[in-house]
Image (cartoon, helix red, strand yellow):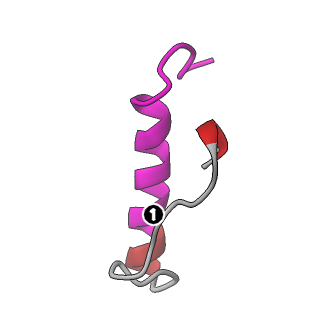
Amino acid sequence: MASFRNWGTSMQDDIIDALDWAIEQGYADPDRVGIYGASYGG
């Protein structure tokens, strides 16, 4: 509920925060990440 009616803002912030964490942990390469899909699921 914290991000209710915040599509495109706080929900994407959560994705970016998770990505930053994964990069810091060495799980993700910051030069090779992306979101792929259609509509909001992408």
Q: Residue furthest top?
A: 5
Q: Residues within 10 Å of mark 1 (few under 14, many from 20)?
A: some
Is residue 26 located in the magenta-colored stretch of the structure?
no
The residue stretch that appears in magenta: 1-21
Q: Describe residue 1's horizontal placement relative to residue 7 as left or right.
A: right
- Residue furthest to the front in view is 38
Residue 28 position in % (x across, y down): 47, 80
- Please provide percent x and percent y for residue 34: 47, 66
Residue at 63% across, 47% down: 38
The residue most toward the left is 31
**Residue at (45, 63) in percent of width and height:** 19
Q: Decide: is 11 above or below 35.
A: above
Residue name at image x 49 percent, y 58 percent:
18
Instruction: Count how many numbered circles sit on residues in the image.
Output: 1
Q: What residue is drawn where x is 41% and y is 53%?
A: 16
**Nearest the eye: 35 or 26:** 35
Image height of 26 relative to 15, above or below = below
Please, is residue 36 above or below residue 22 in the view? Answer: above
Residue at mark 1:
19
Query: Does the magenta run of residues contain 15?
Result: yes
